């Protein structure tokens, strides 16, 4: 029950969600693939757990088993606990007791997650079902993770479990109230989502909420909101000790419900005639012992940040695509071909012998000679000493270099370029062509962290430190070496358990000759999209489609994208997981102090047919499988004010910080896995709500 999974595929009842029609014949891969859309807004976090847990309860059928023990199989994908494209059935054993027909039903659930491989123990108190008290029923759901699937053998109690929480759905007068508290701690600090969400008068049209999100450093941002049937008013700000909003730090916005900008995060390409899926060996999501991440051609992303250094350059992971075990090998630079495409992790170079691959430098040479001003590795102190300028390159020449493989001798960094100072192969006098520090990002600012002394991290200017060298191999083929402090200047290879290299297929490239935003884009009904950002992207082959104002005192700029200015011949690529524009980079969107996400300005509609850029006889059709919606803020609060939704104090909202639950308000399960009943003799088996003959 990873809290991130609770958001994926889980659509809050509060918000409007579009659906997509099936393409062509029934039974094809295309028509069988399901699509989901979620709302990129803090309020969705506050209701997603209730919706997911209500799904678990409904499909486990405790209504059929008032005083008994049974087995239930629940689809984690359907209940929003997995983002897999197909079913993920997880097994649980439930023990139910109920004293009388008028008393609450108590259920203990031993839940074995197929998605995360983790074990959870849940205590449920059921008072009424969704048919009696819509939309979710009345119940309390308390849980903790007993065993971490990424660290099997390590078990916990409710007091020391790194994952635990509650959802309490109850009636308060005429309102339906959802109280939630979710805690996650991977060892770097506790992250918390806690909230009170009320459906006023029992209607999902009118709601209000208060809650907060706490990051692993203990920073807490409060989020509140109020809705009518037509509009939604949101206020994000620190909550003061006096149960009030910090009026000096309010970020408020008015939205018209249903007025959203959609971005596709995961899509598939299918044969344009048969509807068969076009399968590529491509990027994949993964989990670590305590976190999750994404592996791609451009590198690797790890939730919470990675801590790779030259002396700690590997990470054990489990692919979420096929559950295979792999090892990531990182390097503080990357080898590119003449077209600047990464080749560091290709078999020719990564699996070469211990001697590596020899190169000579054609231009922009950096050397490891101690008497040179271009000495490598490049140090932060040396760069600072020259007013934060990278020392001049050696003009050109016959300098020798060696690119090391995964079979590099002990004591040498793997997938790294070394200056072969004496031209006699890898020896102790050779130096790595890289920086001795990396960049970390916090609140939109860069922090430089020394590899050998992380505690000596320094804040510095926003310089993007990177260097390029032009190389030639023994056949005079041109290559480039890029090294830098930023993570996208680094290389990461994935190594399979049999020591082979995980090699990704090249993306499929296709062109839409006459792309028209008004007809071809998922956001065709949104001619302009205004958003806030701390990092406006400047990488685009299209000029004039975006305009940004000056940054405010917090470093936040307001930008507007005009869809019609994106029209023209547009190139896209498909990497096995998503369709991406080759003309426009992703944009960062600022949602709150604790939340920044990314969106794509160009998003082809589901059902769009395209032609291969290399083989015009191949046609494909696109289907968007996972998409996120961002509310488009109104230019003023007029609509929200007309609906009496605006406020600047918690007293005007009607909720305050004392309404937000604490974990100490509830009792977590006392059971352990040793208390789980044996499956032997259990006749009742429920599969996604369908009771077997033994029930």
Image (cartoon, rainbow, N blue to C red):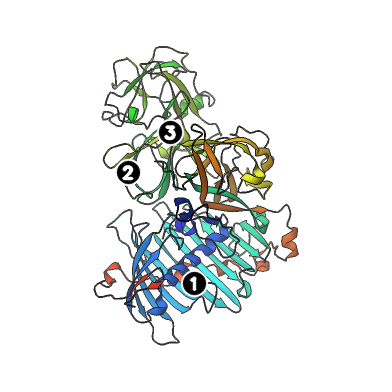
Q: Which of the 4 quarters of the picture holds residue 239?
A: bottom right
Q: Which of the 4 quarters of the picture holds residue 63?
A: bottom left
Q: Is the Cβ of the residue at disc 3 closer than 8 Å to that at disc 1?
A: no
Q: Residue at x 41, y 16 (%)?
A: 361
Q: Residue 245's x, y, as percent?
A: 63, 60
Q: Is residue 111 visible?
A: no
- The CA distance from mark 1 to mark 2 is 39 Å
Other residues around mark 1 within 10 Å, as few (<14) / some (14–19) / many (≥20): many
Q: Is residue 216 visible?
A: yes
Looking at the image, residue 273 sits to the left or right of residue 160; the answer is right
Q: Residue 376's x, y, as percent?
A: 41, 23
Looking at the image, residue 121 sits to the left or right of residue 205; the answer is left
- Please tell me whether mark 3 or mark 2 is closer to you in this view: 2
* Whether residue 691 is situated above or below residue 528 in the rendered picture: below
Looking at the image, residue 560 sits to the left or right of residue 76; the answer is right
- The CA distance from mark 3 to mark 1 is 46 Å
Q: Residue 69's x, y, as percent?
A: 32, 76
Residue nearest the observer in this picture, 64 or 112? 64
Q: Residue at x 39, y 14 (%)?
A: 399
**Residue named by callout 2:** 326
* Whether residue 131 is situated above or below residue 218 in the rendered picture: below
**Residue named by callout 3:** 490
Q: Is the Cβ of the residue at disc 3 closer than 8 Å to that at disc 2?
A: no
- Please tell me whether mark 1 or mark 2 is closer to you in this view: 2
Q: Dot 3 lies on which element?
A: loop
Q: Quadrant of the C terminus?
A: bottom left
**Residue named by callout 1:** 168
Q: Residue 11's x, y, as percent?
A: 53, 61
């Amino acid at each position: 029950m990873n809290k991130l999974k609770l958001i994926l595929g889980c659509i809050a009842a509060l918000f409007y969600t579009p659906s997509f029609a099936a393409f062509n014949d029934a039974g094809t891969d295309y028509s069988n693939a399901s699509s989901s859309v979620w709302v990129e807004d803090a309020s969705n976090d506050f209701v997603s757990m209730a919706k997911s847990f209500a799904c678990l309860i409904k499909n486990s059928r405790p209504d059929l088993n008032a005083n008994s023990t049974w087995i239930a199989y629940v689809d984690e994908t359907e209940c929003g606990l997995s983002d897999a494209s197909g079913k993920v059935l997880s097994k649980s054993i439930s023990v139910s007791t109920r004293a009388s027909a008028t008393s609450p039903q108590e259920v203990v659930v031993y839940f074995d997650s197929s998605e995360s491989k983790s074990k959870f123990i849940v205590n449920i108190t059921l008072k009424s079902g969704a048919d009696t008290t819509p939309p979710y029923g009345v119940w309390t759901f308390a849980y903790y993770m007993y065993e971490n699937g990424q660290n099997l053998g390590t078990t916990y109690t409710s007091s020391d479990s790194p994952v635990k929480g509650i959802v309490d759905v109850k009636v308060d007068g005429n309102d339906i109230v959802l109280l939630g508290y979710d805690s996650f701690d991977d060892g770097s600090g506790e992250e918390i989502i806690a909230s009170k969400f009320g459906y006023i008068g029992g209607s999902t049209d009118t709601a209000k909420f208060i809650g907060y999100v706490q990051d692993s450093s203990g920073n807490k941002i409060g989020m509140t909101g109020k809705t009518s049937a037509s509009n939604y008013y949101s206020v994000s700000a620190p909550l003061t000790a006096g149960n009030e909003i910090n009026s000096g730090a309010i970020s408020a916005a008015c939205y018209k419900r249903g007025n959203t900008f959609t971005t596709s995060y995961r899509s598939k390409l299918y044969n344009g005639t048969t509807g068969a899926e076009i399968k590529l060996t491509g990027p994949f999501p993964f989990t670590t012992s305590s976190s999750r991440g994404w592996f791609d051609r451009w590198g690797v992303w790890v939730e919470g940040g990675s801590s790779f250094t030259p002396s700690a350059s590997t990470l054990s992971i489990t692919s979420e695509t096929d559950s295979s075990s792999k090892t990531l090998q990182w390097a503080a630079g990357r080898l590119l071909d003449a077209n600047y495409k990464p080749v560091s992790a290709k078999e020719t170079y990564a699996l070469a012998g211990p001697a590596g691959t020899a190169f000579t430098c054609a231009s922009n040479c950096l050397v490891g000679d101690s008497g040179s001003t271009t000495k490598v590795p490049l140090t932060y102190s040396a760069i600072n000493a020259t007013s934060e300028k990278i020392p001049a390159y050696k003009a050109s020449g016959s300098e020798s270099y060696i690119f090391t493989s995964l079979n590099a001798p002990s004591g040498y960094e793997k997938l790294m370029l070394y200056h072969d100072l004496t031209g006699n192969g890898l020896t102790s006098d050779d130096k790595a062509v890289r920086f001795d520090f990396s960049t970390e990002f916090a609140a939109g600012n860069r922090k430089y962290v020394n590899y050998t002394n992380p505690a000596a991290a320094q804040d510095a200017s926003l310089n993007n430190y990177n260097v390029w060298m032009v190389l030639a191999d023994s056949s005079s083929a041109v290559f480039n070496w890029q090294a830098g402090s930023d993570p996208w200047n680094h290389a990461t290879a994935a190594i399979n358990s049999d020591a082979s290299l995980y090699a990704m297929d090249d993306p499929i490239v296709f062109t839409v000759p006459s792309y028209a935003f008004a007809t071809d884009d998922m956001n065709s009904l949104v001619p302009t999209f205004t958003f806030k950002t701390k990092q406006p992207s400047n990488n685009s082959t299209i000029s004039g489609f975006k305009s940004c104002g000056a940054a405010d005192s917090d470093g936040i700029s307001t930008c507007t994208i005009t869809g019609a200015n994106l029209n023209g011949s547009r190139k896209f690529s498909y990497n096995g997981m998503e369709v991406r524009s080759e003309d426009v980079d992703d944009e960062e969107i600022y949602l709150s102090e604790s939340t920044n996400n990314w969106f794509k300005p160009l998003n082809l509609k589901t059902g769009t047919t395209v032609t291969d850029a290399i083989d015009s006889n191949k046609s494909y059709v696109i289907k968007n499988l996972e998409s996120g919606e961002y509310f488009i803020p109104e230019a003023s609060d007029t609509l929200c004010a007309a609906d009496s939704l605006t406020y600047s104090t918690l007293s005007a909202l009607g909720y305050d910080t004392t309404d937000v639950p604490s974990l100490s308000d509830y009792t977590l399960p006392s059971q352990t896995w040793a208390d789980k009943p044996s499956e032997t003799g259990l006749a009742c088996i429920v599969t996604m709500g369908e009771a077997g003959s033994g029930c």
